[in-house]
Amino acid sequence: MEINPQLVKQLRDKTNAGMMDCKRALAESSGDLGKAEAILRTKGIASASRKASRATREGIVASYIHLQGKVGVLVEVNCETDFVAKNENFREFVKDITLHIAAAHPLYVSREEVPAKMIDAEKAIYESQVKGKPANVVNKIVDGKLDKFYSTVCLLEQGFIKNPDQTIKELPAQKSRSLARTLLSGASRATWWASRFRRKRRVRAVVFSFIL
């Protein structure tokens, strides 16, 4: 059963459980949010953490328009306090994410959001390329090619345009100690979404949403 990423996010926000735990619980409950929460609590995975219930009502919105208006990105990053929103490192991080999305064309936030049909299609292509090799070799090569595929279509696994050796997932911690403390220490949290669109005959939009 293919699970809606938005349901995974809702369950994660509500229970503070890990993304994959939420996804498995939703699959087990056939997509029923209430039953999935009960499954997590029964397994002792769900947490009543204050962090999960705190609101992110402050933040900033950044935009970037490129190529004479044909490509644009709109990013909203929300945080708990106005103090965090005014932090220079926080603002620089938002700007960098905006520029990266415009340049790198991500289709999904993480590999968990890539549709199973797309993954199966990629696997079929890779397996046909190494047909005839031993099974253990095939599996190793296919896994490696899938990792490469994820690094091109998934935002968190893409190499940062200003430093390709650093992934977007690593960016907050590497950006500066101040930003790392702001976003990752547990003292605060931030949610953000980004919409990237390209104007041809019609507008296409992709929306990203997750918690740092």
Image (cartoon, rainbow, N blue to C red):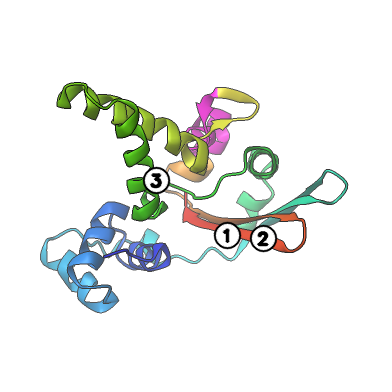
Q: Is mark 2 on a helix, strand or loop?
A: strand
Q: Are marks 2 and 3 in contact (CB under 8 Å)?
A: no
Q: Nearer the viewer, mark 2 or mark 3?
A: 2
Front in this rendered view, residue 16 or 9 = 9
Q: Which amino acid type is marked by label 1?
A: Val
Task: Return the residue at label 2.
Answer: 204
Q: Which amino acid type is marked by label 2?
A: Arg
Judged from this view, the residue extending furthest toward the front is 132
**Residue 8 position in % (x across, y down):** 35, 63
Task: Return the residue at label 3.
Answer: 111
Relative to 53, is 105 on the left or the right? Answer: right
Corner quadrant of residue 10: bottom left
Q: Do the residues labelled 2 and 1 touch (CB within 8 Å)?
A: no
Q: Which residue is drawn at 34% across and 62% down?
A: 12
Relative to 58, is 14 on the left or the right? Answer: left
Tell me if residue 100 is in the magenta stretch: no
> Residue 76, can we see it?
no
Q: Which amino acid type is marked by label 3?
A: Arg
User: How would you rate the neighbour count of disc 2 (Cα within 10 Å): few for under 14, some for 14-19, many for 20 or more?
Assistant: few
